[in-house]
Amino acid sequence: MTGSESANQRKDPSKTTAAVWVPIILGALGAISGGAGWIFNVWSELHSDNDRAIKTYLRPMEIKIHVGERLFDQLGQLKEPNMGILQSYIFKKERNARDPNVELMNELIVDVIQNNAALDTLVDGYYPQVCTTEFHDQALAFEDYKTSYATRWGTASAYIEQNKQMPSSPSFPQKFSIALQGEITARQEHPGCDKSARRGS
């Protein structure tokens, strides 16, 4: 090989360091860019799902719980001392069925049951996405309360006819509102938080 041929070989672009590494670097940058894009898409999807869960289920639950509290406040002003709301309704109706407060209590109790049903629909819709154990447990307690309250109201007329006292039942879970706030906070701080909890687990 002559000196001229050797010089030309050294100048051959395919033989230079740059020619070897530039494609590798560009390929790596492309992979990094693609990976970053994938991470951003996942992050965006998690936040989108999170926002949807909060707006579609959790915030409406707050409203329903507040409505329920207002209804119970009104019923609390009408009930008899040392009696529950449903037993007070039975007592008042037995004593004087034409008492205006009897009809008012009837309307408010129906509103409570309807509000409970609406809240239960939200809980059922959200449950596959639950994050916290506290919300899981309080949702189950609410289910027991909601079912029991509706059943007892459905049998109220029989207790009135037989002049019997209605048995006690679960109360609205007092920690449900706190658990709901904890669930919202968990979602805000940890998008895509654990979804392993399931109703009945």
Image (cartoon, rainbow, N blue to C red):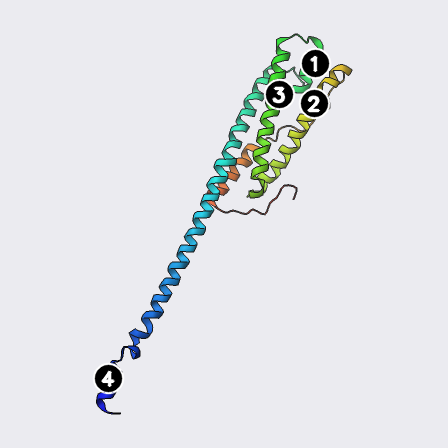
Residue 74 location, quadrant: top right
Q: Position of residue 14 (x, y in %)?
A: 30, 78
Report the residue marked by disc 4.
Answer: 8
Which circle's residue, 1 or 3, is located before the other in the chain? Answer: 1
Where does label 2 land, which residue? Answer: 154
Disc 4 crowd, CA 10 A, few/some/many (<14, 14-19, 20+): few
How far apart are the two marked residues, 1 and 2, measured between alpha carbons? 16 Å
Q: Are marks 1 and 2 in contact (CB under 8 Å)?
A: no
| Residue holding disc 1 | 91
Foreground disc of the pair 1, 3:
3
What is the spatial separation of the Cα atoms under label 4 and label 3, in whole angstroms? 95 Å
Give the residue type that dot 3 points to.
Val
Marks 4 and 3 in Cβ contact (< 8 Å): no
- Mark 4 secondary-structure assignment: helix
Q: Which mark is residue 110?
A: 3
Q: Earlier in the sequence, mark 2 or mark 4?
A: 4
Q: Is residue 122 left or right of residue 189?
A: right
